[in-house]
Image (cartoon, coloured by chain):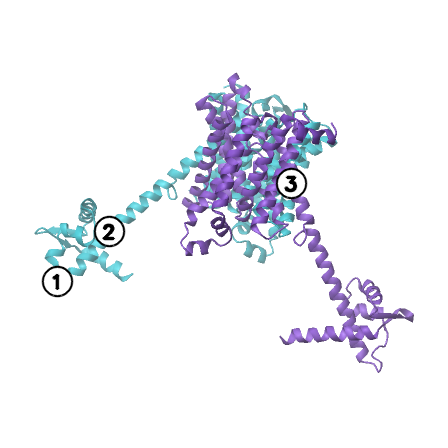
Chain colours: A purple, B cyan
Amino acid sequence: MDFGTLFANLFLDYTVRTIALGTAVLGVVSGALGSFALLRRQSLLGDALSHAALPGVALAFLFTGSKTPITLMLGAAAAGVLAILAILGITRATRLKEDTALALVLSTFFGFGLMLLTYLQRNPDARQAGLTSFLFGQAATLLERDVRLMAIFGGLALLVLALFWKEFKLLSFDRDFGDSVGLPMHRLDILLTSLLVVAVVIGLQAVGVVLMSAMLVAPGAAARQWTDRLDRMVLLAGVFGALAGVAGALASSMGRGLSTGPIIVLAASVIALVSLLFAPNRGVLAAWLRRRRNQRRLLANQVLADLYRLGQQHADPQTAHSRAALRVMAFGAAGVSNTLNALEKRGLVQARPDDHWALTAAGTQAAESHLEDVAAEEDR
Amino acid sequence: MSAPQLEIQLIAALVAVACALPGVFLVLRRMAMMSDAISHTVLLGIVLLFFVVRDLESPWLILGAAGMGVLTVVLVEVVNNTGLVKQDAAIGLVFPALFSLAVILISRFASGVHLDTDAVLLGELAFAPFERLTVLGIDLPKAVWVMGGIVLINLSLIAVFYKELKLATFDPALAAALGLAPAALHYGLMTMVSVTAVGAFESVGSVLVVALMVGPAAAARLLTDNLKRMLALSAGLGVVSAIGGYWLARGLDANIAGSMATVTGILFVVVLVLAPERGLVALAQRRARQRWEFAQAMLAIHLLNHEGRPDYDEESKVVHLQEHLRWTPDFAAGVVARALEGELVQHRNGNLELMEAGRELARQRLMH
């Protein structure tokens, strides 16, 4: 199937459109909520919560015998809330640290869930329920009513986010100030953390519990690199999440029984990687270019100043000096030659015979003004 | 019990011990979540190496997978060092990406070759006895040899570098000042975790690796302050989880790895509640005892304050304590009964009177 058909399907094919809509909803919600988790250093909490949702799904099926998404989602949400309470309880009541509490809750809850799932699978009904698709996600199983449910849950979560926007912002950046003006920061903390559970629950069907954590981290981490403003970051994270979700839906529509979770997560990871590398200002490439530019400017100033100081020791301030001498004075810094060539192009130095170099009139002026700047800096 | 049943339990116990030992250091060094990351990404190592050697039995797979575990640690540090995201996000970015890649590669190119994604999470302990290996004329499941070897390696490495590990764990600054190369120790430990994760991974799946590394060590941490004892307890609790999990799985006809993780969790909760000094029960008892002791000291101080003063008659009546110290009648009665029993006070003419021990207690408390 070529890409043209794929995109045609996205808009024309009912099934593909439904699935894409579902994964887009999931991406928007997890991106927006994950942004807060990222800022509050709760990225790994999402990991624990999503794994911990599994026994909730299994128990919900065990007790109700129903495999409707709403039942399973509520079960998952209950397990997620229980996991949060367990993690908070362990870190408060014992001397164990948060990482241990997270890993412990994550692995034992998930193990318990696996035990229940395999136990349930002895019964052919459960096998048909396709409960194992909650591990890695099967977006292909999304029906219109599932998407509607996801949109309702997600919409409610985003609504709460919008209503308490200022409070959550304060919670993420200056909790102490929030405390001091009498806001119930502890309760807000619990509310915002519980919203993460909603994101996890929405992602159950399409991404699965194993990889859902990445959807809470990657879009937010990517968005963070492009902006310093919270509102823009949350919006952008939503867009990135939706992009990754739709990519997963398209891949799923290609059939072959591919699990959608890994594809969505890989797409989100690629977006994050590109953002880390190429975002303007913060990105790795931008930082590297900035550092190189600074180094070049420093070296150019150094060479100009050296030539100027050498010139002061002669009758003619524009006496030429050898490249070797300049290299020694720059403490053997690499790139003296390149710097001389660049300065020559700017008309600040000129080459003389025998690889000697001299300041031009403009160069003398530039060196003087640079040395004045340095002196002023030192005076301050 | 049949031979395969015994063998499964032996493998489970070996896996538990192999995981519990490095797990102690992960818990103490606040790196428990690295076990989660590593136990997932080793899968990518196994898949990539499988494409090269085309043989799931090859020992190269173990080495390659362990290398991927260490590479995960390096990648997390690289991302962290860019300063663009915090450490927790760095972990959360790196390992799901690598794990997703592995799952996609398996389902696209390697399906049907005994590498399937469910086994990655569930493990295949029940089938472990069928794969056998004869070494020195002894015929045992391959997993026994592999995990036995890893237990031995972990034990000897910890024994040889015990002092260094201990110092680097509890006082990294001093360890660095003494020239112990904390970075080398860190990577050594991460290599140990990776090799253990790969070995255990085949039998019990990735998530149980996390449960067995963190669960027993966390429980042991609540039981002792001594590192050697913590290592021993952790290994012991791991074995109990392994054997208990096996029988739970048999009873329910469920997955063994999941059941072992469940028992690990149950054991932790039991320890959390009942641990002699740090357990919740012990904590509640200590709080209650302190409350009574404090109240008795209050009573003694109160009586001492009013001794020899005209209002003593009034102030030393039990009824009056309720008013003056704002105690409920039951609580006041309890405090007085305890104080009488401890010979801090005695009854005289319907009043309370300090005894020598009570006077001493009041003076002591007032001095502080």
C-alpha span from label 1 to label 2: 22 Å
Regarding mark 3 in the picture, which secondary structure is present there? helix
The lab-note entry on whether marks 1 and 2 share a chain reads yes
Name the foreground residue: B113 vs A17.
Answer: A17
Q: Residue at x 74, y 60 (%)?
A: A293
Q: Quadrant of residue A327?
A: bottom right
Amino acid type at image mark 1: Arg
Answer with left or right where residue B147 lies relative to residue B48: left
The chain to which mark 2 is attached is: B
Q: Quadrant of residue A13?
A: top right
- Residue B240 appears in view: no
Answer with left or right where residue A375 lies relative to residue A32: right
The residue lying furthest to the left in this view is: B349
Regarding mark 2 in the picture, which secondary structure is present there? helix
The residue lying furthest to the front in this view is: A12
Which of discs 3 and 2 lies nearer the camera? The answer is 3
Name the foreground residue: B95 vs A149.
Answer: A149
- Residue A260 appears in view: yes
Quarter in which the C terminus of chain B is drawn: bottom left
Above or below, B136 against A235 in this view is: above
The lab-note entry on whether marks 3 and 1 share a chain reads no
Q: Which mark is residue A269?
A: 3
The chain to which mark 1 is attached is: B
Give percent across and percent down for residue A191.
45, 43
**Residue assigned mark 1:** B309
Which of discs 3 and 1 lies nearer the camera? The answer is 3
Give percent across and percent down for residue B149.
61, 34
Amino acid type at image mark 2: Ala
Q: Which mark is residue B295?
A: 2
